[in-house]
Image (cartoon, helix red, strand yellow):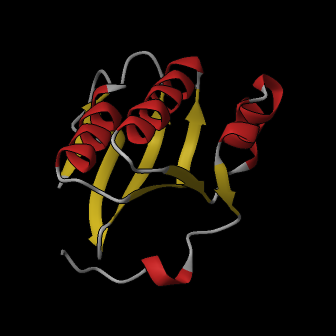
Amino acid sequence: MAADAYGTGGATPRFAADVRWSGRTAVVTLTGELDHDSPEPLVEALGQALAQDAERIVVDCGRLTFCDSTGLNIMLRGRLQAGEAGSALELAALRPVVARMFDITGARALFTVHAELPAELTGRTRP
């Protein structure tokens, strides 16, 4: 299920988060610009994954073109919530502009980060 955040002046979403499942792993695919004007899709996607008892959440950032401190904070909070639920939140396919945010803040060290979405997560099945 996808959630969208629309920018002003158009029907094309500036940011979207899509949740799909591979076994008990929720793959959250982010597309567009994640900033203080568009956090809801990510908040909803992470909440959905946790509500459905994901054993693991992998956030695919391969199509994420921008992330500010709002997005970083949501992912940090999601990591804590996942840990409290007995799950893990991991990141995949960080583009350079997004990786920089995680690197300069030191937040990258808190996550398992995959260079690309792990091959075993490319299927589209629901438990």
The picture quadrant where one finds residue 21 is: bottom left
Relative depth, front residue between 36 and 57 = 57
Q: Residue furthest right?
A: 104
Q: Is residue 44 left or right of residue 117?
A: left
Q: Note whether residue 108 is visible.
A: yes
The picture quadrant where one finds residue 121 is: bottom left
* Residue located at (48% from left, 83% from top): 120
Q: Position of residue 60 (x, y in %)?
A: 50, 57
* Residue located at (54% from left, 83% from top): 119
Q: Position of residue 109 (x, y in %)?
A: 76, 39
> Does residue 64 lie above or below 56 as drawn?
above
* Residue located at (29% from left, 54% from top): 18
Query: How many dots with numbers?
Result: 0
Q: Position of residue 114 (x, y in %)?
A: 66, 63
* Residue located at (18% from left, 44% from top): 51
Quarter of the picture holding the C terminus: bottom left
Q: Note whether residue 97 is visible.
A: no
> Does residue 21 lie above or below 60 as drawn?
below
